[in-house]
Structures are given as structure tokens and as C-alpha cells.
Amino acid sequence: MRLCIVGIGLLGGSFALGLKDKFPGLTVIGVDSNPEHAQKALDLGIVQEILPLKAAVAQADLIVLATPVNAIVSLLPQVLDLISPAGVVIDLGSTKELICTAVKDHPKRKQFVAVHPIAGTENTGPEAAFASLLPGKTMIICEKENSNPEAVQMVEELCRKLEMRISYMDAASHDLHLAYVSHLSHISSFALGITVLDKEKNEQNIFDMAGSGFSSTVRLAKSSPEMWAPIFTQNGKNISEALTSYIEKLQIFKKIIDQQDETGSYTLMKEANEIRRILQGI
């Protein structure tokens, strides 16, 4: 099999490295608009060669779009125009509804499988990629019924080879749920980072006093704005709804603290502790 990765960063690079572990003879072709990233991917052995998009797609059995979601919306119709009759294209974007809508009437729509791996770190670029990122994680497949069964089967088999769990949902439900369990947490982390930077002008104080709790909570604030700004735009309606609920909870906490209501804060935190049971095993 010949694999083409468009956008050789954390997710695209990790997908390639994971499959190379499982298929030693796999050929990986890279496409990247950043020449430094392209060269780094070659140096790290993530890809064997770098080609322009048209040439890469023509040679590939599976094309993986791992760029920011705004680029996926514009690239996907182009790739479907170029793809061979037996080729399959997937995207790894964190939004799905707009991406699926962009090609809903494309004559080769059935050669596209919309997927989202629930995996990642705050790091970016080819050097952030590692083969063990995806095993044990969940791959969401959206609008399965709009893709060729053979294309879906190929993706499912690769996910199983990577030891990933597979989940299915429609694109709208995906975007709604991700607004709460992923996108909101990134906004919360960005906001906390800005709040601390605004208050603590002395960087040494931040370094000296920040414990593991702060570090883990603000970790996502190190994430790529180039990747996340388009996600916030594309899923804006759902994220705004999530933010409204989140802000209401923050206001309740503020009121309880202002009123020195220790019983109230204890009750809220015990309610929140229920998340421990739900997240066991993740």
C-alpha cells in the first residue's frame, strides 16, 4: 500500500509512523506547504519522499488530510478530483459537519471517509509525531453510510491494526459532543493562560509558584493557534453553547466563594468528582 500524508505534523506523522510499525513495507509520500516540515519529516523517516499534491495523490492508495480544518475544506474537493477510482481519502480534522457538507454533492464523495482520532498532545510539527500516539485511542467515523463500504472497511482494518477503538456517529452529533469534551477544554486552558499572564507580569513568579495542577490545566494553552482558530470558527455555534453553560458554572462558583459558602463549594466539587468514575480507563 502507498500512503500519502498531507500535512506532516503530530497527527499525520503519528498515523504514518503507527502504520509503518505494522506494515514494514509501507511507502509513505508526504505533502507539506512548509519546506522545513517537509525536510524534517524526511530526516525523521516519517516519509520516504515529498511530492506536490497532484503527483502524490496520483500514486497513493490512501490519502490522509491532516492539515488545519480550514485547509481540509478547500483541499478535500481537489483531492477527490485527482483521486484514482480505487483510492480512498480520509481527514483527521476535529470538526466534521462543514467538511462533510463541502463534498456532499461531489461525484466521488463515496471515496471519502470522514474520521477523527481522539488523540493528541499540545506539541506540533513532524518532530511531535510518535508511533504510539494512536493505539488504545478511539477513531470516530462519521457519515459511514455516505462512503463506499470497501472504503470504510479499509479504514476500519487500519484502525484495528493500530489497536484503536472505533465509534460511529453523524457529523452534527460529533461536532456538538466535541465542543464540550475537547474544544471547550482548550478554550478554558487558553483563557487560564492569558489570565495568569495578565496578572503575573513577573515570569519568574509563574515559574517558581506553578505546581503540577497549574501545569496540567494550562498544558493545552501551548497548542497551535494555526490549528485551533479554524476549529473554533467552524464549530462556533456549538462552542458558544458550551461556553454559555461553562460560564454559568463559573458564575455559580464565584457566587459561592463571594458568599463564603463552604458547604456550597463542597457540594459542587463532590458533584464534579463524578467525572472520575466516567473517565476511568481513559
Image (cartoon, rainbow, N blue to C red):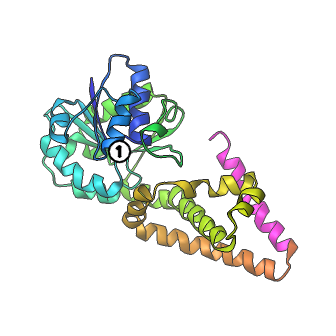
Name which residue lies at 13% across and 34% down.
85
Q: Is residue 79 above or below residue 242?
A: above
In this view of the protein, can residue 108 be seen by the observer? no
Principal SS element in the magenta part? helix
Quadrant where the image shows the C terminus: top right
Q: Is residue 151 left or right of residue 173?
A: left
Counting the numbered discs, the total is: 1
Name the residue located 74 percent from the left edge and 51 percent from the top edge.
212
Report if residue 273 lies within the magenta region: yes
**Membership of 181 in magenta stretch:** no
Q: Is residue 216 above or below residue 10?
A: below
The vertical placement of 58 against 106, above or below, is above
Q: Position of residue 128 (x, y in %)?
A: 48, 39
Query: Closest to the observer: 111 or 190?
Result: 190
> Can you identify the residue that label 1 sits on?
66
Q: Indicate the amino acid at tag 1.
A: Ala
For the residue labelled by badge 1, is the local secondary structure a helix, a strand or a loop?
loop
Extent of the magenta region: 263-282
Q: Position of residue 181 (x, y in %)?
A: 55, 56
Q: Residues within 10 Å of mark 1 (few under 14, many from 20)?
A: many
The residue lying at 41 percent from left, 52 percent from top is 94
User: Toward which corner of the image does residue 225 lie, by quadrant?
Assistant: bottom left
Task: Find residue 201 and report its horizontal and vertical position in percent.
Answer: 67, 71
Question: Residue shown at 63%/73% (left/top)?
Answer: 198
Determine whether, in the image, residue 82 is placed left or right of residue 183.
left
179 left or right of 15 in image: right
Quadrant of the rendering where the N terminus is positioned? top left
- Whether residue 2 is visible to the viewer of this picture, yes or no, is yes
Q: Residue furthest top?
A: 25
Q: Quadrant of residue 70?
A: bottom left
The location of residue 237, given as percent across then percent down, is: 42, 70
**Figure check: 14 above or below 265:** above
